[in-house]
Image (cartoon, rainbow, N blue to C red):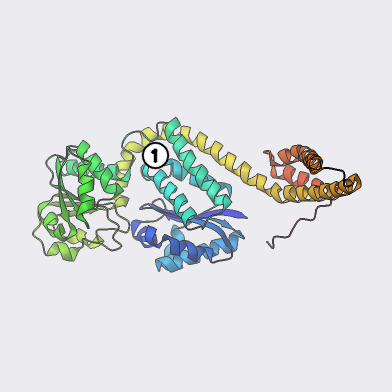
């Protein structure tokens, strides 16, 4: 069996490629089934966020299994191999485990130490369990990744401060406002006419950071009014006007700064829409993937548009201060990765342990029946139970030390040598798994 992760992220692919491989929660079950139908894919789970699409798998054969994953990605995205393959990364075995630990801890995020990625890894685990696409190996790996992410945040200061895509988007708006005034610094947003399109988790964080950066009122636009009003009620000190998507043109005409973060699969703002409106100076910041704002809006006079890939400009300003803390986190990640790999390696001994136990159990049962038959009818049921318990206790005592040693951390060579010795001494016949 072989652990592998195949995917792409903000480090390897631009947003126009990533958006073609964004898998929504609604289509997750079908995607997992499509992967599991291939005999090479034993277990699978998918992490899909605005900055990454990663498929974690337990494969029967690494080469054939990875080919199956690539074929799925090509079919799902509609991209050609030449368009997709240069952006893909592949990690195997220990590298795959280490990569997941770094992702869960926020060390591979655009915003170093961001907290939202941990909830997304939790979601990946939950969906894999709900759709029964995972077995014991990935379930253990993802569960440990979640606990590792929590540990990093509790034992280091990596997660302190404004560390999210939403906070970076707000800082980008402040930076661009400052640059428009000839200043290379973050400017308060108190004079901006602000709108936020979408009322999900990212928008919640947007409202939180907008309020902290001087914004006192804004328009919250959403497909349904109740959800927008529910979100607005959580910010009593922020004057929030809730509107439906039908009023988007009104917001585009009135506002100077608009953030978009919706689950729409196609752009909701494009050049055609803007060209029919009377616009002033308008800055658009899109943190949705797939993108909510089409690339062609750049051609509209007075419109300045940014997407998630543009956040790097502000992220780099804060990255250096977090690097030292990240080094502390790396130490914890190596420890957690080692613990999982030791557990996984110990599974190699399970077939031999099970066969050894079955062999001794068969001997015990046979000898027990011989002894009981010699006892005669005067031997009571209670006495029979005592003798049977005694025989089981002896077998468990005999097995305890070799089983403990086989499961203990050791090199693979040492474990394999120990397994061969036991299999030879007890003449164990292990079942062939067909692999």
> Is residue 264 positioned above or below 95 on the image?
below
Residue placed most toward the observer, 252 or 391:
391
- In the image, residue 184 lies at what x, y percent? 21, 38
Residue at 24%, 51% (x, y): give it.
Answer: 227
Residue placed most toward the observer, 348 or 231:
231
- In the image, residue 313 lies at what x, y percent? 30, 44
- Other-residue count near label 1 (Cα within 10 Å), few / some / many at <14 / 14–19 / ≥20: many
Q: For the view shown, which residue lies furthest in the right direction?
A: 374
- In the image, residue 87 lies at what x, y percent? 43, 58
Can residue 22 be seen here? The reply is no
> For mark 1, what is the residue?
113
> Is residue 402 positioned above or below 9 on the image?
above
- In the image, residue 268 lies at what x, y percent? 23, 61
The answer to whether residue 341 is left or right of residue 326 is: right
> Is residue 1 positioned above or below 115 on the image?
below
Residue placed most toward the observer, 414 or 302:
414
């Amino acid at each position: 069996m072989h652990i592998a992760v195949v995917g792409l992220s903000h480090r390897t692919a631009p947003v126009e490629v990533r958006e073609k491989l964004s898998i929504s929660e609604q289509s997750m079950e079908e995607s997992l089934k499509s992967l599991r139908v291939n005999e090479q894919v034993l277990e699978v789970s998918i992490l899909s966020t605005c900055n990454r699409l990663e498929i974690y798998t337990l494969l029967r054969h690494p080469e054939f299994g990875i080919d199956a994953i690539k074929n799925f990605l090509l079919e799902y995205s509609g991209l050609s191999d030449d368009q997709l393959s240069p952006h893909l990364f592949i990690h195997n075995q220990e590298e795959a485990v280490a990569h997941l630990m770094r992702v869960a801890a926020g060390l591979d995020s655009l915003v170093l130490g961001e907290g939202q990625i941990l909830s997304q890894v939790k979601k990946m685990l939950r969906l894999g369990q709900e759709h029964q696409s995972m077995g014991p190996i990935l379930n253990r790996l993802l569960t440990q990744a979640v606990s590792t992410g929590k540990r990093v945040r509790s034992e280091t200061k990596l997660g302190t401060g404004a560390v999210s895509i939403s906070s970076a988007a707000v800082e980008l708006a402040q930076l661009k406002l400052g640059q428009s005034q000839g200043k290379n610094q973050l400017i308060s947003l108190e004079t901006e006419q602000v709108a936020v399109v979408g009322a999900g988790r990212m928008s919640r964080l947007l409202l939180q950071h907008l309020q902290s950066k001087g914004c006192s009122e804004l328009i919250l636009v959403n497909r349904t009014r109740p959800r927008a009003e529910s979100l607005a009620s959580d910010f009593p000190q922020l004057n929030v006007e809730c509107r439906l998507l039908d009023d988007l043109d009104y917001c585009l005409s009135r506002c100077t700064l608009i953030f978009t973060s919706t689950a729409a699969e196609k752009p909701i703002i494009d050049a055609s829409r803007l060209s029919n409106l009377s616009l002033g100076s308008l800055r658009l910041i899109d943190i949705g993937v797939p993108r909510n704002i089409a690339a062609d809006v750049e051609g509209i006079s007075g419109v300045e548009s940014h997407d998630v890939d543009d956040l790097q400009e502000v992220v780099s300003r804060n990255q250096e201060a977090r690097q030292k803390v990240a080094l502390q986190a790396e130490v914890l990640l190596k420890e957690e990765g080692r613990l999982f790999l030791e557990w996984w390696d110990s599974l190699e001994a399970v077939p031999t342990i099970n066969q050894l136990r079955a062999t001794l159990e068969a001997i015990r049962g046979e000898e027990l029946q011989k002894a009981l038959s010699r006892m005669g009818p005067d031997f009571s049921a209670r006495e029979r139970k005592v003798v049977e318990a005694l025989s089981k206790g002896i077998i468990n005592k005999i097995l305890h030390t070799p089983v403990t040693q086989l499961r203990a951390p050791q090199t693979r060579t040492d474990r394999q040598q120990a397994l061969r010795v036991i299999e030879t001494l007890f003449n164990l016949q292990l079942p062939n798994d067909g692999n």
